[in-house]
Image (spheres, grey):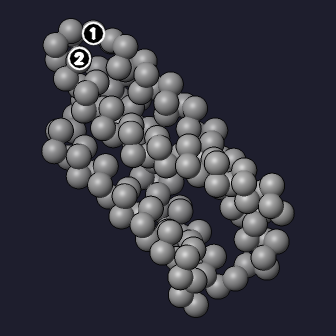
Amino acid sequence: MDWIKIIHLLCVMGWMTSIFAVPRALIFWKREWDRLGEFGPLGDLTIRLYRFSAGLAVIALGTGLWLAHLWQWPSWSLLKIVLVLALAGHYAYTGRLVLKARRGVFEKSDRFLRIFNEVSVFGAIAILWVVVVKPF
């Protein structure tokens, strides 16, 4: 079981890096697009980061469910799953923004993307609180 925990934590760390970095990268990609009028290196980097972390997200979700099963679904794990699914929804919406940006459509403002980025931080804090405190 220790190896499952290690793999889970490593994949969560990689996925969280992308959750925090991609919305910020979209801001800089938008500025690059406005300056160059074409697809540049920031766009390529953003897409690659999102794709790589999507695999990490799948592994993190799978190992997390496996651990919950091994621990016989403690009551706090259900709350964690709900919060993780909300964060996964945030991540999926980020992917939608990346796909639009790839076509040159940047419909969200810098301010929106900054606030959107901070929402994920609060989501991560909530998940960590549930895991550490185990409120019920």
| Above/below status of 12 relative to 69 | above
In the picture, which quadrant includes the N terminus?
A: bottom right
Q: Position of residue 7 (x, y in %)?
A: 72, 50
Left or right of residue 74, residue 69 in this image: right
Residue ID at (44%, 71%):
126
Asked whether 100 or 44 is in front, the reply is 44
**Chain-order first, disc 1 or disc 2:** 2
Instruction: Quadrant for residue 53, please give it.
Output: top right
Q: Amino acid at mark 2?
A: Trp
Q: What label sits on residue 100 in the rendered view? A: none
| Above/below status of 104 relative to 132 | above
Question: Circle 2 sits in a helix, a strand or a loop, which is it?
Answer: helix
* Residues marked 1 and 2 touching at CB (< 8 Å): yes
Instruction: Quadrant for residue 98, please give it.
Output: top left
Q: What label sits on residue 38 in the rendered view? A: 1
Q: Hey, which residue is sitting farthest bottom in the picture?
A: 136
Q: Position of residue 23 (x, y in %)?
A: 33, 40
Question: Circle 1 sits in a helix, a strand or a loop, which is it?
Answer: loop
Q: Amino acid at mark 1?
A: Glu
In the picture, which quadrant includes the C terminus?
A: bottom right
Residue neighbourhood size for the residue with mark 2, other residues' Cα within 10 Å, grouped as few (<14), some (14–19), many (≥20):
some
Q: Which residue is mark 2?
A: 33
